[in-house]
Every structure is written in C-alpha cells, then in structure tokens.
Amino acid sequence: MKSFSFSPLSDKEATILILGTMPGTKSLELNQYYGHNQNNFWKFMFAILKEDFSNDYEIRKALLQKNNIAVWDVLQHCERVGSLDSAIKNETANDFETFLQQHPKITTILFNGQKAAAFFKKYVPLKKAYQLITLPSTSPANAGKTYQSKLEEWRFALGSQRHNPDRLHTY
C-alpha cells in the first residue's frame, strides 16, 4: 500500500527539526503526527518542555511552534503494509534542500529512531553543517529501552540543543 507523509509542522523561527521516517497507519487515519496513543512522542514533548499534557492536536502543534521546533518525516512516500519501518519499500525522500533553505535558523536535526537517520543519510546531501542526533524511537514497537531511559535521552538532546546550539557536526 502506498503511503504519503504530511506537510511539515514548521515556521521560519524553527531552530530544531525532528524527523520521523513515515507516519504509521493510525497517524495517517487521524491525519496527525504521532497519532497512535501508545507513541510517546507527545508525552515526551510536553514533559521536556514543562507543559501540561494535552490530547488536543492544535495545542500540540502550538507547543512545538512556541519552542521553535519543526517536525517532518524523512520520506515523502513509500510502499508499506502496516506501520513498521522495517516494512518500508520503494521509498522517496522529501525535498530537504528546499525545506532547509526556507528554514535557515535550523541548526539541529533530531532523528526519531535509527531508520529515520538511515534514510536521511541515504538520500539527503547536506550543503551546510548541522548537529545530527539519532534518538531512540518513540514508537511502541521500540521496546528495547524503558520509557524513562528514552525520555532522558530526548530530554538531554532537546535541552542541550535549545541552550547550546553552537555545536555543529555533519555526518
């Protein structure tokens, strides 16, 4: 089944870009990033950014915008049955050259899982230096680490980038 990603959640003030691989079945059904209620992405964002949790998607998007965080997916479309990244075939990447030109304040790119980082490295040549950080997937399918250990890795990465964005590296 061919799946298509969403438009990015972003504005010109974004300094951090968080990239997933491709929306899962539940996210596509709801037309929301990280729509599966067992995905920890939104729980992490509210906890790290010290805001009261909300299920309201408009509040969720506003939280990211208020904190200069953009969200998108590495892939524009692919074929996949189900929601697992391991099932992705015939993928095409999003247009990062244009996106990054239109968002010049982005200095850090965080990957929500190993597959997002792998697809990005496979398809996206970078023309300038960015801090690239691969984090554990917030997906319920990623059971290799505890909720708390994943939250701490996300907290450290987001906290250090929001307060010290000058450490730039390329892959």
Image (cartoon, rainbow, N blue to C red):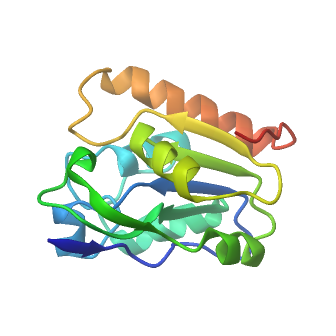
- List x then y, in percent, for residue 143: 23, 26
**Location of residue 119 in the rendering, given as x and y in whole percent from the top left corner:** 47, 51
- Residue lying furthest front in this view? 90
Between residue 57 and residue 71, name the one nearer to us: 71
The residue nearer to you, when weighing 53 against 135, is 135
170 lies above or below 136: below
Residue 158 visible to an observer of this rendering: no
Q: Residue 28, relative to residue 55: is it above or below?
A: below
The residue at the far right in this view is 166
Question: Measured from the top left, where is residue 1 in percent x and y?
Answer: 14, 71
- The answer, for residue 144, to whether it is visible in the render is yes
Number of numbered labels in the structure image: 0
Residue drawn 36% across the image and 64% down it: 91
Residue at 28% in and 43% down: 139
Residue depicted at 58% across the width and 74% down the height: 95
Along the viewing direction, whichever of 81 and 40 lies nearer the viewer: 81
- Is 163 left or right of 150, judged from the image as shown? right
Which residue is located at x 76 percent, y 42 percent?
A: 170
Quadrant where the C terminus lies? top right
Return the residue nearer the eye: 57 or 144. 144
- Does 129 sit left or right of 75 as displayed? right
20 to the left or right of 158: left
Above or below, 49 relative to 157: below
How far across and how far down the image is residue 63, in percent? 53, 62
